[in-house]
C-alpha cells in the first residue's frame, strides 16, 4: 500500500499536518543526527535505534483525536480519544502487578463482566498521570471520566475503556479531561485523514518515549480484506509480564470477544511479554484489541476457526513490531539485542534463562561497552537454578563462537568479536545442552543515560 498513490498522499498529509511535532523525529532519523530533541519530554534525545512512524491506512469504524488537557507543563497533546462504531468488540491483557492502577481495574472489571467487550464505544488515554496507587479517589476519577465520555457518546459507562500513563501516586484530575471533551468531539467529527489520526495518537500517548510507535498490516478473512493498526508507548520500566507499556490495536474485522481474548493471549507471550529494558514491571500495563466489524468480513465466533489463520499471523506481526519498538526506545539505549536460548529442557525453562540474560545489568552494560563478555552470560545462565549442562554449554555472539562444550572456543577471534559488538543490532545465542526447547527475548543495553533519565523523571 505504501507504494500506491493513496499511500503517498496520506504520507504527505501526515507530514504537513504534524510537521512541527515530528520535525525533531525526522531530523533524528537522518544519518549523524541522532542527538536531535525528541517530540515528547523536553531534554530527551531521539533514540539512535528509532524507526519512522508507518503510513497507516483507514480502519473502518474508528475515529481518533488528541487534545492538550494539561497534565504536562510543557506544550503537548496528552489526551487521546478513540471513538468506535456500535457493536465494536474488545479484549484486553493487563499487568499482573499487585498494585494495579484505577484504569486497569476499570477495564478488567467491565471486560470480565457479563457480555464484557461486546459493545465498546470509546477509549480514553491520558499521559502524564498514571492514576495508580491512588485509592478510592483515583477510582472515582476514573469512573467520572468514563461517565462524562459516555454521556457525550450516547453509551454506557462500561462501554468506555480507560488507560493512563505517567507518575505513580498522583490522583487523576478528571476535570482537565472533561474540559476538553467539546474540543475532542469536534476533532472526532472533523475531516482528518486516518494516517494523521494514528500519527497524532502515537505522539499523544508518549511519556519518556523519544519517538511514536505504530504498526499496520492487512490480511484476508474468508476472502475479505481486513486491516490491523496499532500504536504503543513504552521506554523505561519495561519487563516481561505484560511489559511496561500501553498498546492499542484496532481491526475492522468482525470477531467475538472470546476469540479476541484468545488471540491476544496467544500472541502476547512471544511479543509484549518477550521484551525487557530494565526488568521492572509497571502498575499500568495495558494492551487492548478492538474489532469494529466495518470491513464486511464474516463474524468469527469460534477460536479454532481456520479462517483466522492469516489474520492471526498479521496480528502477531503488528504486536511483535510494536514490542520491538519499545526496546528500540529503551531509555538511553544504543543497542538492540536478540537473546535466544536453545537446548533447554522446556519452553518455560528456555524463557527463564533468556530473560535472566536479557535482564542482567552486567550483561547489558557489557553490550553498552561493546564488550563480548561471555563470562557474564555464563553468570546469568547459572544463577537461574534451571537445568543446564556445564559440559555442553555453548555461546555465540552473532556468527562468532565464544564458548563451546563448556569452555572457551579454540577458534575465538577477539578482533572479529570486537568488530561485531560495534553493530547497533546484536544477537546472542546460548545452547544449554539439556533438550530441544528454545525461547527468544529482546532487550537493549544499559547506559549512563538510563540513570540520567530516571534520576530526573519527576523534575
Image (cartoon, grey):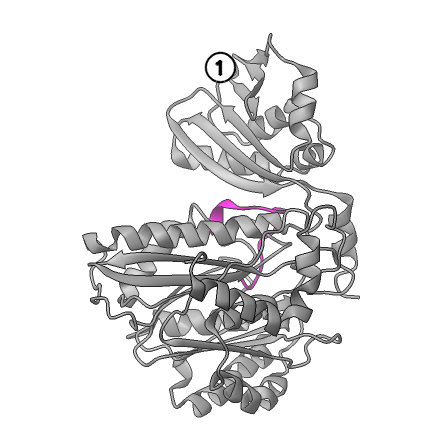
Residue 346 shows in the view: yes
Q: Residue at x 20, y 66 (%)?
A: 298
Residue 334 point in image, percent of width and height: 69, 42
Q: Is residue 201 visible?
A: no
Q: Nearer the viewer, residue 268 or 337?
A: 337
Q: In the rendered structure, does residue 275 fall within the stretch colored magenta?
A: yes
Number of disc labels: 1
Q: Magenta stretch: residue 16 in it?
A: no
Outermost residue, top side: 410
Q: Residue at x 31, y 63 (%)?
A: 226
**Position of the N terminus by quadrant:** bottom left
Q: Residue 370's x, y, as percent?
A: 71, 31
SS label for mark 1: loop
Label 1 belongs to which residue?
392
Nearest the camera: 40 or 446?
40
Residue 197 percent location from the top left of the image: 51, 73
Q: What segment is highlighted magenta in the picture? A: 272-287
- Residue 373 rendering spot, x and y as whole percentages: 68, 25
Give neighbour class at mark 1: few <14, some 14-19, many 20+ (Cα, 10 Å). Answer: some
Q: Quadrant of residue 59?
A: bottom left
Amino acid at each position: 500500500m505504501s507504494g500506491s498513490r493513496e499511500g503517498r498522499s496520506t504520507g504527505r498529509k501526515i507530514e504537513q499536518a504534524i510537521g512541527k511535532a515530528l520535525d525533531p523525529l525526522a531530523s533524528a532519523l537522518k544519518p549523524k543526527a541522532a542527538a536531535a530533541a525528541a517530540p515528547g519530554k523536553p531534554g530527551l534525545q531521539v533514540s539512535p535505534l528509532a524507526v519512522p512512524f508507518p503510513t497507516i491506512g483507514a480502519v473502518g469504524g474508528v475515529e481518533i483525536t488528541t487534545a492538550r488537557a494539561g497534565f504536562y507543563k510543557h506544550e503537548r497533546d496528552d489526551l487521546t480519544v478513540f471513538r468506535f462504531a456500535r457493536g465494536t468488540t474488545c479484549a484486553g491483557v493487563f499487568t499482573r502487578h499487585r498494585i494495579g492502577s484505577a484504569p486497569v481495574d476499570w477495564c478488567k472489571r467491565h471486560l470480565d463482566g457479563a457480555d464484557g467487550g461486546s459493545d465498546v464505544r470509546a477509549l480514553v488515554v491520558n499521559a502524564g498521570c498514571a492514576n495508580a496507587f491512588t485509592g478510592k479517589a483515583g477510582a472515582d476519577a476514573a469512573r467520572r471520566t468514563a461517565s462524562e465520555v459516555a454521556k457525550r457518546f450516547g453509551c454506557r459507562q462500561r462501554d468506555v475503556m480507560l488507560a493512563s500513563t505517567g507518575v505513580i501516586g498522583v490522583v487523576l484530575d478528571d476535570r482537565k479531561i472533561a474540559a476538553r471533551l467539546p474540543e475532542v468531539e469536534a476533532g472526532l467529527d472533523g475531516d482528518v485523514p486516518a494516517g494523521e489520526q494514528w500519527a497524532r495518537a502515537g505522539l499523544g500517548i508518549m511519556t519518556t518515549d523519544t519517538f511514536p510507535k505504530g504498526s499496520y498490516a492487512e490480511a484476508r478473512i474468508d476472502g475479505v480484506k481486513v486491516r490491523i493498526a496499532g500504536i504503543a508507548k513504552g521506554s523505561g520500566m519495561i519487563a516481561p509480564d505484560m511489559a511496561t507499556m500501553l498498546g492499542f490495536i484496532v481491526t475492522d474485522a468482525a470477531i467475538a470477544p472470546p476469540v479476541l481474548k484468545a488471540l491476544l493471549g496467544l500472541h502476547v507471550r512471544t511479543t509484549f511479554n518477550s521484551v525487557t529494558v530494565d526488568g521492572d514491571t509497571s502498575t499500568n500495563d495495558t494492551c487492548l484489541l478492538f474489532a469494529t466489524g466495518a470491513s464486511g468480513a464474516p463474524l468469527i465466533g469460534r477460536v479454532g476457526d481456520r479462517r483466522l489463520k492469516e489474520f492471526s499471523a498479521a496480528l502477531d506481526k503488528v504486536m511483535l513490531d510494536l514490542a520491538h519498538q519499545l526496546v528500540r526506545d529503551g531509555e538511553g539505549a544504543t543497542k538492540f539485542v536478540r537473546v535466544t536460548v536453545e537446548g533447554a529442557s522446556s519452553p518455560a525453562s528456555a524463557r527463564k534463562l533468556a530473560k535472566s540474560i536479557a535482564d542482567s545489568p552486567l550483561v547489558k552494560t557489557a553490550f553498552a561497552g561493546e564488550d563480548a563478555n561471555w563470562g557474564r552470560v555464563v553468570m546469568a545462565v547459572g544463577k537461574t537454578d534451571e537445568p543446564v549442562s556445564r559440559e555442553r554449554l555453548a555461546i555465540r555472539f552473532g556468527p562468532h563462537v565464544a564458548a563451546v562444550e563448556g569452555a572457551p572456543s579454540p577458534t575465538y577471534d577477539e578482533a572479529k568479536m570486537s568488530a561485531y559488538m560495534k553493530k547497533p543490532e546484536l544477537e546472542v545465542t546460548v545452547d544449554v545442552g539439556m533438550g530441544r526447547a528454545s525461547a527468544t527475548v529482546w532487550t537493549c543495553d544499559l547506559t549512563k543515560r538510563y540513570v540520567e533519565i530516571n534520576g530526573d523523571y519527576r523534575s
